[in-house]
Every structure is written in structure tokens, then in C-alpha cells.
Amino acid sequence: MVDRVERLTNLLALLLETTSPLSLIQIIGELPGQYPETEQARRASFERDKAALRDIGVPIETEIVGGGPYAGQTVYHIDRRAYELADLELAPDEMRALQIAVAAVRTGSGAGQEAIWKLGGALGDERLAVSAVMPDRPELPVIRNAVSTRSTIEFSYRGATRRLDPWGLLLRGGFWYVIGHDHGRDEQRTFRVDRFDSTPEGIVVGAPGAYERPPSFDPRSAFPSDPKEIGHDAFDGMDALVHVDRLRAPAVERELGAGRVVRRDDDGIVVSVPASNLPALRSWVLGLLEHAVVLEPAEVRDDLLGWLSKVASSDGEAT
């Protein structure tokens, strides 16, 4: 049986995707092997899961079927209008990335998990078997609150005191960044949250309503929209050729766009993928499991193989 976090994620995705409310029997049928076999244990497990999702703000609605062969049965669904954020103004490829994250990412705290799940979305028929850990930071609740209340924050960063009007938070390349107006430099600046010298308690938050975020500000413009394009090393600007088999080829082509397809063959497609950020590329390739192989350049392929070897060696030592 799958662990509870995975089951909760699958239940959330199912109730978001369904076009009509589902009964418990239908839910069990859609999530085979994820609930106990006996009726009493199954019902108890489902009720705990339902309560857990409601506790983090997921509006699970219940209805009683009024007529027909299923009259009297209780059915469940999620009110998407009450659950989803409607003002993100995301492009289709950005929404696709967030939808994948909903099904694939686990965070280090309940607050982080709620923020990811609130994005909602449906994955469609091609569900990528991704597993990743979303980094959490103790400073994030303080900064998020300052962003929402438009409060200036003061903190120590690399030995210097900085005053910032925080316009937004962004996760890129496995790190959290806060973007805003730096009072000392009198310009837009970006700070990596894990490099704050201040503890969360050491971040001074000013009065609410201290600034207005520029209408033209778009946090997506602070970094490339694709985290694999963020350069951290000598692979800056480099692309990798990755072969994707026929099973995953349609989904990958929709994700990357037809312009990234280098060639097609009987076994699938070869796509050109940004390799500036090797950890992000590794995460993307490993998310495709056995359905993708890095072909070139050799140094990118060797990096992935070397990383896998280290992971395998560490797992062996752990056991």
C-alpha cells in the first residue's frame, strides 16, 4: 500500500480532475491498492484523508444523490472556484509546470504543502512519475507575510544590513529568492533566502502598506521561465540532447514545444533541453524514469551517470 502523503496527493488530484462528484466506491476504484480492503477500515482511512485535506484548506464538498440507482449515496468533489487561485495569469507551459508540481512535489512543512496544493490543476492522461522534494526555509512565512501586507523588511545579508520592499518570492534552481526594491541601492534586487545572515526572528518587518508594488513587475521576468536555463556553472547556455520513448514523447513535446524536437524515429523523439542548471536537468530526466536517456554532450551525460552512481553507493551504505 502507498504511503499516506502519496495517497492524499492522489486523492486531491482525483477530486480536482473529476467532472462529476464521486462516491467512495468510485474513488476506491480510481485509486486501486491505496485503501484497505475491508469496508470499515477503508471508510475510516478515507474519512481521515478527507479531514486532513480540509484542515489545510481544501474545500471538499459532499452531496447526497437524490434519484436513480445511486439514490441516497454520498458523493464528493472539490469546488475549484473556491480552491484554485484565479489571478496567476500563467501561460499554458507555466501552468503545465505547476500542474506537474502539484502531483510530484513534496515540501518540508505543512505550510509549504498547502501553498503548492492551492495551485490546483489537472494533469490529463499522461501522469509523469516524478518525485522531488521542495526546499523549505524558516524565513519563508515571515517574508510571505511581508509580501502580502506590503511591509518593508530589514535583514542582514552577507554581512550588510539591507532594507527591501519585497515584491515577490520565487523558487528557482532549488533555491528561494525574494525580489523587490532595495532601499540602499535604489533599484530592483534579488536575494537568495538561504543566504540571509538573519534568523527568522532577526528579520525586522515594518508597518503594513509601506509601499506599492509596481504594476509592471512580473516575478517571472526575474529568472528564465525554465529552471533548466538558470546558469550556475560551466554548462551555462548549453543544451543537451535527450531521447524520449514513444510512451512519453507526446507529453514531452507538448511540455517543451515542437521547436525543441530535433528528430523523430520509430522509438520516439530526440529533444534539445537546456542544461545550464544540471540539478534541474537531472530532476527532469529522472522524472521520466526509464523513458528518457541523455545522449549528449558527454559531460552532461557523465554528470548524470556520476550522480546516479553516488546515490546508488549512498543507498548501499545506508542499508
Image (cartoon, rainbow, N blue to C red):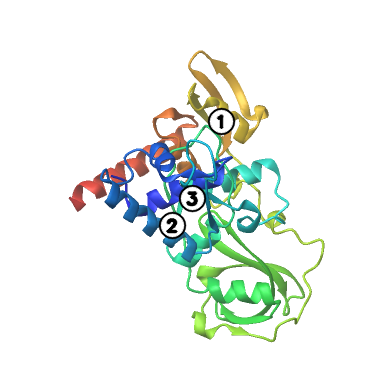
Q: Which residue is denoted by mark 3 in the rendering? A: 12
Tag 2's secondary structure? Answer: helix
Q: Is residue 14 positioned above or below 190 on the image?
A: above
Q: Nearer the viewer, residue 47 or 308?
A: 47
Q: Is residue 245 left or right of residue 188?
A: left
Among the 4 quarters of the image, the one containing residue 180: bottom right
Question: Residue 197 at x, y = what percent?
Answer: 51, 78
Identify the amino acid type marked 2: Lys
- Nearest the viewer among 275 and 36 is 36
State the separation of the CA atoms marked 2 and 1.
31 Å
Quadrant of the rendering where the N terminus is positioned: top left
Q: Can residue 276 be seen in this view?
A: no
Please state the horizontal and vertical placement of residue 313, each as a whole percent of the image.
25, 45
Q: How crowded is mark 2: few (under 14 residues within 10 Å), some or many (20 or more)?
A: some
Q: Residue at x 49, y 67 (%)?
A: 111
| Residue at the spot of label 2 | 50
The tag earlier along the polypeptide, 2 or 3, is: 3
At label 1, which amino acid type do we have? Ala
- Crowding at mark 1 (Cα within 10 Å: few <14, some 14-19, many 20+): some
**Does residue 131 sit above or below 163 in this rendering?**
above
- Residue 251 is marked as 1
Q: How crowded is mark 3: few (under 14 residues within 10 Å), some or many (20 or more)?
A: many
